[in-house]
Amino acid sequence: MTDQYEPRPEHKFTFGLWTVGNIGRDPFGEPVRQPLSPVELVHLLAEVGAYGVNFHDNDLVPIDATPAERDRIVREFKQALEETGLVVPMATTNLFTDPAFKDGALTSNDPRVRAYALQKTMNAIDLGVELGAKVYVFWGGREGTETDASKDPAGAIKRYREAINFLTEYVIDQGYDLRFALEAKPNEPRGDIFLPTTGAMLAFIETLDHPEMVGVNPEVAHEHMAGLNFVHAVAQAWEAGKLFHIDLNDQAFGRYDQDFRFGAVNLKSAFFLVKFLEDVGYEGSRHFDAHAYRTEDYEGVKDFARGCMRTYLILKEKARQWNEDPEIQALLEEIRADDGSMAAYQGAYSADKAAALRAETFDRVALGQRGLAYERLDQLTVELLLGVR
């Protein structure tokens, strides 16, 4: 590797304990790697050059730990962070693994489950803030149905709204410097999950009591599972001022949640994502929510983590080259040419502007005959990514 593609703290590359700590279990096979402790995983991430580590509450503290065990684990984790220099930018709550959450957590039909989920989340928020987290992610893994006979979907959304409102008030009451980021997914592990896309989450946020505290955490794989364009989802979130966090991985369209290494499948899509984030100046974490192939040992896990970061940095350099390529930029200038003749009709509405626009004459045939050279533009992009430009 060259120094150009070595991760540095300013790149803000982070991984979850659940990513490099994935032991390779799947629905058809037993684990292939022995579990490592959170302390060991922090040191692994430091070895590969990561900036930070994120966690679900029970990635760090087992759900049945005693208060004394909890304090010891947190103390040892803090020591590992101090030794390695890693930080904790984000935390989240596991509201999907335990059987108590089999019908959801914040949208469960059982009010005792909903209350327990709020309690568990408050405790997890406390833990995240204690370790330095500034963003708190909510992924509703079980917030859905297999049969629509089981839940009123409007009622479920109301329950979810009430829970997020409750928790934002808790953060305010505690004086925490913390923002929420909601993560969408269309399905799996439920047949259908409520609020399945980033766009749905953005609409939901505007109905909350404190929308200014809540944004989104879009994930590559989750939008691709639904066959959607991830770059467009990220752009919508950014334009709305709601891109609080992002999960990077890769995914074949329409498949189960694969969580592949970033850039492993859809390289051109990954390129335009990196280009967008770098062009707009996104300053948050670049969080890799992915895991190594089940074929790997822990040396392979390190290869996976290094590969995620290296691919991002390679694509960042490719984005710089694209932005500076004379032929590409000349073609873009031609495609986007504006002679100023339509300036009078742009911007905000006015009655005079509308009247003038109604009187304007357009050559519809000529508008339809103009070639836009998108084939050439796309081929130049492909050639740049293939390294022949």
Image (cartoon, helix red, strand yellow):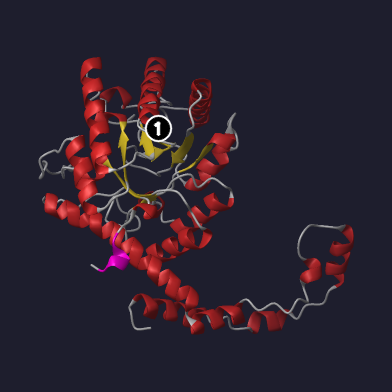
**In this picture, is 226 found above or below 139?**
below
Residue at the location (12% across, 53% down)?
Answer: 299
Given residues 199 and 276, the one toward you in this image is: 276
Using the rendered view, name the quadrant where residue 56 is placed: top left
Relative image position of residue 222 (x, y in whole percent): 38, 49
Q: Is residue 59 visible?
A: no
* Rendered-image quadrant of the C terminus: bottom left
Residue drawn at (11%, 44%) of the image: 33
Residue 334's spot in the image, x, y percent?
61, 82
* Badge 1 density bin: few <14, some 14–19, many ≥20, Cα 10 Å: many
Q: Is residue 164 left or right of residue 74?
A: right
Q: Main secondary structure of the magenta part?
A: helix
Does 4 appear in magenta? yes
Q: Nearer the viewer, residue 376 or 330?
A: 330
Image quadrant occupied by the N terminus: bottom left
Q: Could you say which quadrant of the image residue 245 lies in?
A: top left
Task: Please tell me whether residue 23 belongs to the stretch shown in magenta.
Answer: no
Say which residue label 1 marks: 143
Query: Tag 1's secondary structure?
Result: loop
Where residue 168 appears, x then y in whole percent? 51, 27
Can you see residue 117? yes
User: Is 303 placed left or right of 186 in the picture?
Assistant: left
- Measuring from the top left, give residue 125's x and y in whole percent: 40, 27
Q: Which residues are magenta?
A: 2-6
Q: Quadrant of residue 38?
A: top left
The residue most toward the front is: 83
Q: How many marks?
A: 1
Inspect the image, locate mark 1, and give the three-letter code of the amino acid beneath it.
Glu
